[in-house]
Image: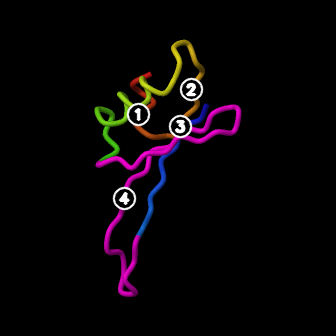
Amino acid sequence: MKVTLAGIVKADGHGIVEKVAVFGLLKRNGKVYTVAVPNTQTATLLPIIREQVKPDSIVCTDCHKLRMAF
């Protein structure tokens, strides 16, 4: 499973109006779990990971500070 962060940007033609943080989990079987989150802090993301990831799973992540929580 890979943990990634992505952003959805809305523009009005004059620049960025709003940016929404999206947290996603890509499972080995190709299924993807995504959810819009209010921020990318560890306190926000870790409960989602604990709910969606089975214990003893191998987790690969990008260089996000969240990896330090593992």
Which is more foreground, mark 4 or mark 1? Answer: 4
At a point 56% along the width and 26% down the height, the residue shown is 59
Please say whether residue 69 is one of the residues in the magenta stretch.
Answer: no
User: Where, quadrant-wise, is the N terminus in this rendering?
Assistant: top right
Along the line of sight, which residue is nearer the eye, 39 or 51? 51
Is residue 69 placed above or below 21 in the rendered structure?
Answer: above
The magenta span reads 10-38
Determine the CA span between mark 2 and mark 4.
Answer: 24 Å
Circle nearer the N terminus (2, 1): 2
In the image, is 4 to the left or to the right of 37? right
> In the structure shown, which secondary structural element does the residue marked by tag 1 occupy?
helix
Along the line of sight, which residue is nearer the eye, 8 or 61? 8
Give the residue type at disc 1: Leu
Density class for disc 3 (Cα within 10 Å; few <14, some 14-19, many ≥20) is: some
Q: Which mark is residue 66?
A: 1
Q: What residue would you read off at disc 4?
A: 20
In the image, is 44 to the left or to the right of 25? left
Give the residue type at disc 2: Val
Along the line of sight, which residue is nearer the eye, 38 or 60? 38
Please say whether residue 14 is one of the residues in the magenta stretch.
Answer: yes
At a point 42% along the width and 67% down the height, the residue shown is 9
Which is more foreground, mark 1 or mark 3? Answer: 3
x and y, in percent, of residue 53 in the image: 51, 24
Query: Magenta residues: mostly which secondary structure?
Result: strand
